[in-house]
């Protein structure tokens, strides 16, 4: 997971990281030591996904490339290793605030298993992630469908 000072700079944001192999299409999501699939913080127990018509438009948007660069810096990986999917943006309501959830592709040919293990994370197929936080499971389902073109 990200160091607390770095994680706090992403207030109102969460990132769902995945790797899809170029030839086999094997898709794996990053799960952090805390059991969450979201960086920099897990969702609180009382959270729920929002439908697009329930989201209030925000005046300030940060470009996906800027977010990816900041996230890469927080994870201590090269900036070209992460790419935010501009077509996937979900929102979750947590007590007192709405957070945006971005889908982030790890761009390496093979998943950097050791590199992420050093950061307290592992790459897991979606079937290994069952039983997690219900809102995270809903986000994973949407992300998986999006990645596979559904």
Image (cartoon, grey):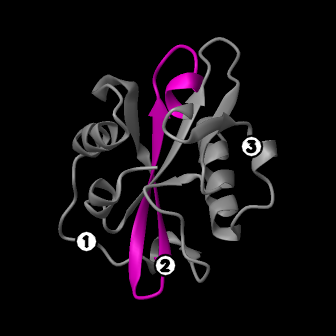
Magenta-drawn stretch contains 114: yes
Residue that numbered label 1 is attached to: 58
Spatial CA distance of label 3 from label 1 is 31 Å
Residue positioned most to the bottom: 96
Which of the 4 image quarters holds residue 98?
bottom left
Q: Nearer the viewer, mark 3 or mark 1?
A: 3
Q: Nearer the viewer, residue 74 or 50?
A: 74
Instruction: Look at the picture and state if 40 lies above or below 58.
Output: above
Residue that numbered label 2 is attached to: 93
Tag 2–tag 3 contact (CB < 8 Å): no
Is residue 68 in view from this perspective? Answer: yes
Mark 1 is surrounded, within 10 Å at the Cα level, by few (under 14), some (14 to 19) or many (20 or more) other residues, namely: few
Which of the 4 image quarters holds residue 70?
top left
Residue 87, image x, y percentages: 43, 45
Q: Residue at x 65, y 11 (%)?
A: 23
Residue that numbered label 3 is attached to: 126
In this picture, which residue range is highlighted in magenta?
89-116
- Secondary structure of residue under mark 3: helix
- Residue 8 placement, left or right of 31: left
Q: Nearer the viewer, residue 105 or 113?
A: 113
- Residue 68 placement, left or right of 88: left
- Secondary structure of residue under mark 2: strand
Q: Nearer the viewer, mark 1 or mark 2?
A: 2
Residue 54, image x, y percentages: 46, 80
Identify the mark nearer the N-term, 3 or 1.
1
Identify the mark nearer the N-term, 1 or 2.
1
Q: Residue at x 59, y 15 (%)?
A: 22
């Amino acid at each position: 997971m990200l160091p607390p000072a770095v994680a706090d700079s992403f207030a109102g944001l969460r990132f769902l990281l995945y790797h899809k192999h170029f030839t086999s299409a094997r898709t794996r999501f990053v799960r952090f030591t805390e059991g969450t699939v979201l960086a920099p913080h897990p969702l609180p127990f009382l959270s729920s996904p929002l439908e697009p018509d329930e989201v209030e438009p925000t005046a300030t948007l940060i470009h996906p490339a800027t977010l990816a660069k900041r996230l890469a810096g927080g994870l201590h990986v090269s900036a070209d290793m992460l790419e935010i999917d501009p077509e996937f943006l979900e929102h979750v309501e947590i007590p007192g605030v709405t957070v945006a959830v971005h889908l982030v592709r790890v761009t390496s040919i093979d998943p950097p298993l050791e590199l992420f293990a050093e950061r307290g994370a592992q790459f897991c197929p979606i079937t290994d992630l069952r039983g997690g936080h219900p809102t995270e499971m809903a986000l994973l389902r949407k992300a998986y469908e999006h990645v596979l073109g559904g």
